[in-house]
Image (cartoon, grey):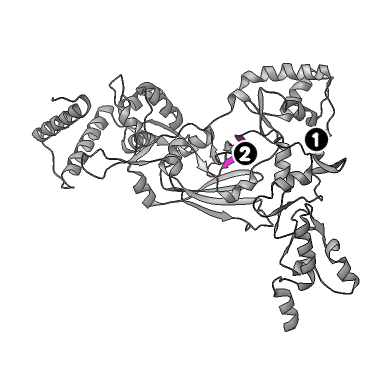
């Protein structure tokens, strides 16, 4: 059993060792731009018989990807930034020390660790040039190979889908079996093609088909009661998100977790726009490769049904989006708590609960575009349109919504569509096949009468300070006449 002194030795925190003060001061004054080894610092002391290690001094940090290199707390390790600069061709690698010196704007000294197999150093006169190891690891294609690839990729442009290097090489082998091309050579050639975008480590997409995040609509908070039109504007990009981060491994300055998870409480704009934000602590997981564009395609998994998804990442706005994600969010409501786990294998989405307070709060949001656009040239209600669209065959929510917008000739608020589908008995949801269909036991006329009576009772109840009364015919006529007169004055400036 260890004694008290031994136990204290193992539990004590690193401190400032006075024996190393002179070395630390000289290193900072020299503004050296390279990391160092333990032998570089402690060899003189070891020769004098002093038992000491760098881990005992809190001013020293070990380089996380190296077994032998260290740097000071006043320094910033810049290998990742240098790698990205070379990949994105922001910097050509010339004059490494000068480039690092230009980055010393915040007071910290930027350093480079040479124990990194992604790079190689080239001596050019009195300066050092930094280059990527894989930059010259491929052979040049022959003119015939380039011509074959050009023909193949031109044919692929019309398909508008993702291609991996393996798929391209397999198709090339079918058409031209005598031509053998290495994957790294194919990657280097594709990176020079203006019609194609690299959207993953091994994923390519026609540039014309790159998805984009559309402009966000404005939302407003609907008044609780009364006829006022004073809405409180809510901009989606400015709304605070309820995000709870759950890093699988705690993030420190020396270690970045390779798995990050967080929870987000879904709001109306999440559901309508099909967009989720990426928290700051997960952004180090962004894929990096030469000529990688934004957005980036990522593998996704919806845990509840095990379906595979293609998730798009906008690295500039730090948003997750895409058609697959939108279709999954279409089935959810505001207040649902979604857990997102991101690892090197991809992104997993899991439903873990619901926040009733958020659900009630978001129920008051309406889309302002619905107040300014023409309702419909067909003078057909949303309910009637939905019924006619479902007469022939069941529809997924996404397809049904798109057809409804086309039929109504304007963008319909998705919350309104969800309310109609869920609240009327003539529509029912098939949970097995994930689509909406008509209920054969309920007639269209019956549900229409129920809907009109429900809306009328709710409106009269709201105007009467929640005093519930049973409306008669004279009250209905008087109420509708008053409403029509108000609308006539507001929009046409005259009297009815």
Q: Quadrant of the N terminus?
A: bottom right
Q: In the visual, does 435 lie left or right of 78?
A: left
Which residue shows up at 20% across the image and 42% down it?
Answer: 226
Work out which residue is located at the far front of the displayed protein and give it: 29
According to the image, label 2 marks what residue?
299
The 10 Å Cα crowd at callout 1, few under 14, some 14 to 19, many 20 or more, is some
The reply to whether dot 2 and dot 1 touch (C-beta < 8 Å) is no
Q: Provide residue 430's location: percent of width, then percent of height.
A: 43, 35
Q: Is residue 337 magenta?
A: no
Q: Main secondary structure of the magenta part?
A: strand
In what element is the residue under mark 1? helix
Establish if 53 lies above or below 394. Answer: below
According to the image, label 1 marks what residue?
135
Gap in angstroms between the C-alphas marked 2 and 1: 27 Å
Mark positioned earlier in the residue sequence (2 or 1):
1
Q: Provide residue 173's location: percent of width, then percent of height.
A: 79, 22
């Amino acid at each position: 059993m260890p004694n008290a002194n031994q136990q204290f030795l193992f539990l004590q925190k690193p401190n400032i060792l006075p024996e190393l003060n002179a070395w630390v001061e000289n290193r900072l004054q020299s503004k050296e731009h390279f990391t160092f080894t333990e032998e570089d610092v402690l060899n003189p002391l070891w020769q004098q018989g002093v038992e000491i290690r760098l881990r005992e001094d809190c001013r020293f940090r070990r380089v996380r990807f190296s077994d032998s290199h260290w740097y000071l707390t006043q320094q910033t390790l810049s290998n990742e930034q240098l790698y990205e600069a070379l990949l994105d061709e922001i910097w050509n690698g010339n004059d490494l020390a000068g480039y690092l010196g230009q980055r010393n704007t915040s007071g910290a000294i930027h350093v480079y660790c040479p124990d990194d197999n992604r790079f190689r150093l080239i001596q050019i006169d009195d300066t050092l040039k930094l280059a990527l190891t894989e930059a010259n690891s491929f052979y040049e294609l022959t003119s015939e190979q380039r011509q074959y690839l050009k023909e193949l990729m031109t044919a692929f442009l019309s398909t508008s889908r993702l291609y991996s290097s393996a798929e391209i090489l397999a198709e090339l082998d079918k058409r031209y079996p005598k031509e053998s091309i290495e994957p790294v050579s194919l990657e280097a050639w594709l990176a020079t093609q203006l019609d194609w975008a690299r959207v993953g480590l091994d994923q390519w997409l026609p540039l014309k088909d790159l998805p984009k995040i559309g402009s966000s609509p404005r939302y407003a908070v609907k008044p609780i009661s009364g006829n006022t039109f004073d809405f409180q504007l809510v901009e989606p990009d400015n709304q605070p998100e309820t995000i709870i981060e759950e890093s699988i491994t705690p993030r420190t300055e020396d270690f970045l977790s390779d798995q990050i998870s967080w929870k987000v409480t879904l709001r109306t704009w999440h559901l309508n726009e099909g967009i989720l934000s990426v928290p700051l602590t997960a952004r180090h997981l962004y894929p990096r490769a030469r000529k990688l564009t934004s957005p980036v395609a990522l593998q996704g998994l919806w845990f509840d049904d095990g379906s595979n998804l293609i998730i798009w990442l906008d690295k500039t706005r730090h948003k997750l989006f895409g058609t697959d994600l939108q279709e999954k969010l279409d089935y959810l409501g505001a207040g649902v708590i979604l857990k997102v786990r991101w690892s090197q294998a991809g992104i997993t989405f899991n439903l873990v609960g619901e926040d009733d307070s958020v659900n009630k709060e978001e129920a008051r949001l309406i889309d302002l575009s619905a107040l300014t656009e023409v309702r419909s040239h067909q003078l057909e209600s949303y309910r009637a349109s939905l019924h006619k669209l479902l007469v022939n065959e069941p529809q997924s929510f996404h397809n049904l919504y798109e057809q409804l917008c086309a039929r109504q000739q304007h963008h319909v608020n998705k919350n309104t569509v969800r309310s109609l589908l869920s609240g009327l008995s003539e529509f029912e949801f098939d949970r097995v096949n994930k689509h909406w269909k008509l209920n054969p036991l309920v007639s269209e006329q019956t549900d229409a009468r129920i809907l009109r009576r429900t809306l009328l009772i709710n409106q009269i109840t709201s105007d009467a300070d929640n005093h519930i009364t049973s409306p008669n015919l004279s009250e209905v006529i008087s109420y509708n006449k008053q409403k029509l007169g108000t609308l006539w004055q507001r929009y046409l400036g005259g009297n009815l």
